[in-house]
């Protein structure tokens, strides 16, 4: 019997499809929702500058859009610190989720390279962000301080089929303070239709453009905000472009990702070959049989047919033993005060004389008396040790049975005699028949042994597809902890204003 491979083969196919879908996103058509961490809203956004440990007085963005859909970005940030601080955090998203006005959606994963900062800095990946920690751990300052940050942002291939698009958060909603005087310069690689150019600012999902003024000079867009962006608010540019505007954009799939996909395909092919050789049952030509196979009782036939035996199959030994002439089954009628009920009586005709251990246990279990037996655990251990010394194997339950005093024996029993008692005998027989030794007799060892290789392949693929998100995006471990320890909001040290991601 070789039915062991079904679930493994299906697992590989599902795993491969999931990986392929995770690396491709095809949607069509044009509004945006960034997949940044959403800060909890407070009762009002109109905090004064003194409400924050620091504010940003000026935020200038110089963005050069390349023909391959990558952006060379220079940010000049002038911050004013109301209290002594070491520096700031700049969080840049490594993933984005776009929701357009027609309801279409797409996701992308970005690569951030060529990072340079005018101050001391370190970088890390946290919760889907590239986090740039800027400042000196050995010094603090107050008042005005400026930072210049440069980096290349590779957003990958445009997911739309009929048009290209530029959709980018010039200011993301990850900032935890007010931002004043935002200015931007966007240089496009080719000409474009400025009538489909637009900006929006405010809370996540806002399409309000009243806070932005801009003008277009050739391929360059120059603009600024007219009001303050409060904590958690963003500034987004959106521009629909003709299909083919971007050329040479890559899918942001590195060699490691390609290797994992190829490995999954190879594993699926290996699993398919193993299934074809070991997993398929030989074709069985059914024949009409009126009697059980010679030498097998009803419980053993059930085990051979199903691969395991249940309580019903074991109880069938009652009929089997009756047919063998060891006992008889009679229907009885029990009279109550106001009603009559049907019952049964099982009567012993002769002692069991066969050599089948399960039949003997069943037969003796039927006619055991109700007197409680004294169980001697020490004697049971001695019996097990003695069997082991002779090269035999005996279960602890059987050793207890052998060490206990004999029951009073009966010649007939009813349902009340067996109630809350006979199940011990049934469980003992099931344990014996369903033993590993018996299963190895009916299942081909060549098929059973191959399952471990499939398990190892599944584990290997799981590790490979988990390592990369953990290292680059910090997602997998966050997902595990989110499932085990869910929270209703992001963890914040400032409980009064619920502001997260505070500067150092």
Image: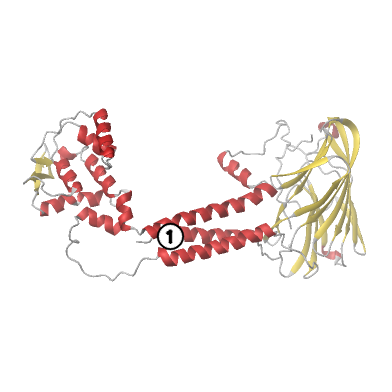
Residue designated by label 1 = 5
| In this rendering, position of residue 375 left or right of residue 240 | left
**Which residue is nearer to you in this view: 150 or 217?**
150
- Could you say which is closer to the camera, residue 85 or residue 212? 85
- Quadrant of the rendering where the N terminus is positioned: bottom left
Identify the residue at the far front of this view.
Answer: 390
From the viewer's perspective, is residue 427 above or below residue 292? above
Q: Residue furthest left?
A: 349
Where is residue 2 shown, x and y percent of the image? 37, 61
Left or right placement of residue 465 versus residue 281 in this view: right
Give the structural element (helix, strand or loop) at label 1: loop
Is 213 on the left-hand or right-hand side of 471?
Answer: right
For the point 28% across and 45% down, which residue is it? 431
Residue ranking furthest to the right:
217
Residue 70 in the image: state x and y as whole percent: 80, 59
Splitting the image into 4 quarters, where does residue 145 fall?
Answer: top right
Q: 10 Å neighbourhood of mark 1: few (<14), some, or many (≥20)?
A: many
Residue 81 x, y percent position in the rendering: 86, 33
Asked whether 78 or 350 is in front, the reply is 350
- Coordinates of residue 197 in the picture (x, y in percent): 83, 61
Which quarter of the figure is the C terminus placed in?
Answer: top right
């Amino acid at each position: 019997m070789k039915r062991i491979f079904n679930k493994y083969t299906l697992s590989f196919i599902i795993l491969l499809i999931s990986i392929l879908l995770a690396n491709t996103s095809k949607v069509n058509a044009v509004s945006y929702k960034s997949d940044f961490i959403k800060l909890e809203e407070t009762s009002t956004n109109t905090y004064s500058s003194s409400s924050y440990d620091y504010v940003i007085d000026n935020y200038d963005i110089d963005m050069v859009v390349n023909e391959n859909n990558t952006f060379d970005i220079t940010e000049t940030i002038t911050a004013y610190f109301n209290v002594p601080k070491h520096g700031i955090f700049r969080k840049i998203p490594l993933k984005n989720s776009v929701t357009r006005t027609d309801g279409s959606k797409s996701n992308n994963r970005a690569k951030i390279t060529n990072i340079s900062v005018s101050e001391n800095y370190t970088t890390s990946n946290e919760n889907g962000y590239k986090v740039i920690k800027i400042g000196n751990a050995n010094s603090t300052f107050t008042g005005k301080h400026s930072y210049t940050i440069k980096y290349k942002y590779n957003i990958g291939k445009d997911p739309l089929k009929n048009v290209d698009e530029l959709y980018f958060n010039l200011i993301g909603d990850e900032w935890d303070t007010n931002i004043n005087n935002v200015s931007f310069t966007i240089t496009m690689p080719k000409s474009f239709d400025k009538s489909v150019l637009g900006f929006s600012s405010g809370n996540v999902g806002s399409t309000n453009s009243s806070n932005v003024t801009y003008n277009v000079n050739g391929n360059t867009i120059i603009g600024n905000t007219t009001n303050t962006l409060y904590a958690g608010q963003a500034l987004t540019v959106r521009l629909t472009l003709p299909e083919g505007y971007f050329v040479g954009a890559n899918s942001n799939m590195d060699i490691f990702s390609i290797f994992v996909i190829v490995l999954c395909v190879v594993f699926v092919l290996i699993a398919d070959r193993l299934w074809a050789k070991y997993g398929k049952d030989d074709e069985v030509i059914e024949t009409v049989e009126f009697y059980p196979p010679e030498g097998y009782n009803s419980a053993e036939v059930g085990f051979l047919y199903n691969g395991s035996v249940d309580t019903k199959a074991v109880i069938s030994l009652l009929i089997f033993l009756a047919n063998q002439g060891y006992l008889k089954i009679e229907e009885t009628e029990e009279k109550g005060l106001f009603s009559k009920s049907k019952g049964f009586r099982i009567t012993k005709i002769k002692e069991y004389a066969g050599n089948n251990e399960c039949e003997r246990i069943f037969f003796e279990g039927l006619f055991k008396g109700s007197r409680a037996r004294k169980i001697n655990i020490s004697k049971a251990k001695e019996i097990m040790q003695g069997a082991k010394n002779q090269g035999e194997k005996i279960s602890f339950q059987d050793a207890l049975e052998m060490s206990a005093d004999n029951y009073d024996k009966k010649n007939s029993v009813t349902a009340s005699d067996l109630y809350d008692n006979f199940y011990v005998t049934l469980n003992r027989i099931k344990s014996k028949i369903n033993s590993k030794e018996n299963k190895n007799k009916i299942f081909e060892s060549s098929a059973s042994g191959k399952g471990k290789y499939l398990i190892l392949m599944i584990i290997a693929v799981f590790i490979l597809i988990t390592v990369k998100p953990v290292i680059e995006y910090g997602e997998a471990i966050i997902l595990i902890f989110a499932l085990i320890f869910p929270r209703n909001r992001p963890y914040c040290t400032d409980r009064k204003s619920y502001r997260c991601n505070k500067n150092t």
